[in-house]
Amino acid sequence: MGELRQHDASNDTSAAVDALSAISTQLIRTTAWTEAIPDLLEVLGSTLCAHRVCLLENYRRADGRLIAKSLGKWCSPDLEAASADDGCNEFTYGDLALPFGEDLQVHMIAQGRSCDFPEPSRRALELASVCFVVAAAIKTAGTWWGSFLVQYCTEDHEWSDVDRKVLEAVCEMLDAALSHRAPEPMAESYRELVEEIPAILYIDDPARQYRSLYVGPQIETILGISQATWLNEDDAWQRNMHHDDWASTTRQYEEFISRRAATTLVQEYRMIRPDDGRVVWIRDECKAVPPTADSPGIVKGVMYDVTEQKGLEDQLRSAQVKRRALIEQIPGIVYVQPLSDSTEEPFVSSAVEKILGCTREQWLYSDWWLDHLHEMDRDRVTAAQRAAEEGGELIETEYRMRLDDERIIWINETSRALFRDGNPWVLQGVLADTTKRKEAEEQMEFLAFHDVLTGLPNRAMFNEHLVMALSRAVRNNRAVAVLYVDLDDMKQTNDSHGHRAGDELLQATAARLRSVVRKEDLVARFGGDEFLITVPDLERRARPPVRTANGTFASPAAALAIGIAERICAAMSMPVQTSGGLVHPAASIGISLFPDDADDAIALVQHADTAMYASKQTGRGTFGVYAKNPQS
C-alpha cells in the first residue's frame, strides 16, 4: 500500500476513484482492516481537498455516555504542525470536537461553519484553525458504528454534491468491510455517479494554460464538444467562447491561477456550440488546490448550463424596464417603502422631483417627506399611514405639504401595505398633486357665499349668519341689529362717470364698511348698491337709555347700532377717486333691532329696509331707526 501514499492528485478523477477502489479491496480481503486506515484517510482527504480527516469508532461507557474513539487521523502536508494534532483521542458527541450531537445518525451527513456553532464548540474549533466541518455517520448492520470527521481551515470552502457523494460512497465501502461483504465496484459506481450529474466536471492543470486533465462526458450534451476535442486541443475553450466574453473571462482566470492559493473563482460567460451554433450560458465555479511537496496542484471545477435561467432573467429585466417606463409616465409619485425586516429595495418615481422639488435620494434616504408635511396635517396623516401598514386596507388621505420655496401644495395619497408570511412587507402608494383642483373647489365654495366684485359675503351667507345670530341671541337673552345701507345717487354715478367707476365705488364702499364695524359684525353685499350689516350679541338687559350723538336717548343696543351708522355716514362722506373721476358718495341707512322690532330674520331685514327708505326721504347721507308705530 506504500504506492498509494505517493498518489498524485493532479492525474485526474479516475486516479482517486482507482485508489479508493484498491483500498476497498484490501479492506475486504484482510482481517486486519485497520491497517488500511492511513491510506484510506489520505486518499479521502486528498480527494475532498480537506485539511484534516479523522475516523472515529463509537462505544458506550458504563454511565451510558456515547464516546467516539479516534482510529486514525490524516492531515494535509501544508497544514501547520501546531494545528495538525490536538492531542485528543476520545470525544463525547456534542462536545468540542463533535458539535453535531447524536442526531448525526439521523441525518447521516451534517456540515457547518465553526462560527455558527455555540460555545464551547465554536471556540475549540477556532483554536484548532477549523473554519468548516463535515461529519458523516458510518452504519453497519443497521447500527451506528462511528463517523468520519472532515475539517477545512479556509473560510471560502464550498462543499459540493460531488464531495458529499464521495463521502457517502466511502461510508458504504467501510460498512461493507465491517460486514465482511463485497462492495459494488467502487470505480464503476463513482464514475456512474459523476456522469449522472447535470453539469460538466473538470480538472485543469494550472501549469498548462487552458488545458484540462479531465472533463466529464456532459461536455458533449451541454456544449456539443467531444471529450477528446476538449482534452487534446488547447484552444477548444477559447475557440468556442463568445468573442465578447473571452478577454474578461481569461483575464480573471489568469489572475486566479497566478495567486496559487486555495481560492474559488465563479464566472459566467457564453459558449457557442460548434454543431448548431446555439449560444449556451455557462456558470463556471472552480477551486484551486495549491501545490504541495507531493503534488503540483490542480484546479477542479464544475460548469453549469444556466441558459434557461439567463433567459428568465432577461425576461424579468425586460418586464422591469417596461414597468418602470409605465410608472414614469404616471402623472403622480409612485413609491415603494420597505417595512419591518423587508429586503425589498425602496423606490420612488422621478415625478417626485417635478412635483415636490426634492431628489430621489432625499425622498428615499432621509425624512424629507415627514419634515415637509404640513404641521396641521401631520398627526392625522401619520396615523392613517400606520393604519395602512397594520391593516393592509387601501387608504386614501389628502394633506398639505410645505415645499422648500414655502409654497403649500395639496397632495392626495392612495396607499396599501402588502404582507408576507403574515407580516407587513412593503407599503406601496401613489401621490397626486391636487393643488389646482383644491383651489378650484375653494374658489367655487367662495363664490357660492361671496360677491365676486367686492369679496364681501353675499345674500346667502348673510341670511345664514343672521339666522345663527338670532338663535344665539334667544339662548343668551341678547339683541341683534341689522343695518340696511343703500348708496345715494348710484345711477347718477354710473351715468356720469361710467360703470367701471361705479364698480370702483362699490369696492371702496365695501372697504369703508369693513373698517367701521366691529370684528364680530358681518358686512354683506345684498345686491346692486345695497349692503347689509349684522351686529350680533348686543346688550339687552334693562338699563337706562343712552344719549346718542344727535342728543336723543336710546337703549344700549340701539345706541351701539346708531354709533355704527354714524361712523358709516362719516366714512361715506369722503370723496372717492375712480378711473372716471372724483365721486362724492353718500349712503342712507336703516336700522332694526331684534327682538324689539321683529322676531325673525326676514321681518328684521324688511324693517331695516323700511327704515332706510324713510331716512332717504329726509335727505342724502342720513340714517333712521325702525319705529313700529310711526304715527304716535
Image (spheres, helix red, strand yellow):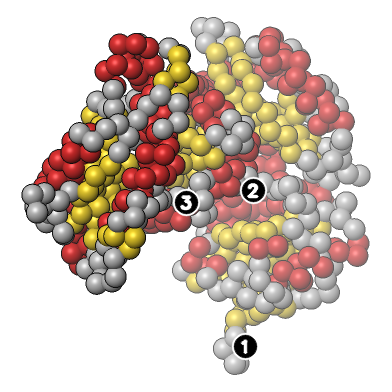
Farthest residue toward the bottom? 63
Residue in the image at 75% along x and 19% along y: 248
- Compared with 278, 487 (above or below) is below
Residue type at mark 1 is: Arg
Residue type at mark 3 is: Met
Q: Are marks 2 and 1 in contact (CB under 8 Å)?
A: no
Whole-angstrom CA distance, mark 2 to mark 1, is: 34 Å
Which residue carries the number 1 mark?
61
Residue in the image at 50% along x and 46% along y: 374
Q: Residues within 10 Å of mark 3 (few under 14, many from 20)?
A: few
Whole-angstrom CA distance, mark 3 to mark 2, is: 60 Å
Left or right: 199 in relation to 250: left
Left or right: 22 in relation to 318: right
Residue in the image at 45% along x and 18% along y: 582
**Of labels 2 and 1, the one closer to you:** 2
Q: Are marks 3 and 1 in contact (CB under 8 Å)?
A: no
Looking at this view, is 449 or 330 the one in front? 449
**Of labels 3 and 1, the one closer to you:** 3
Q: Position of residue 488 (x, y in %)?
A: 29, 27
Q: Position of residue 548 (x, y in %)?
A: 34, 56
Residue in the image at 25% along x and 71% along y: 541
Q: Residues within 10 Å of mark 2 (few under 14, many from 20)?
A: some
Which residue carries the number 3 mark?
376
Which residue carries the number 2 mark?
159
- Compared with 413, 106 (above or below) is below
Residue 226 seen in this snapshot? no
- Compared with 41, 461 (above or below) is above
Q: Secondary structure at mark 2?
A: loop
- Whichever of callouts 3 and 1 sits on the residue coming sooner in the sequence is 1
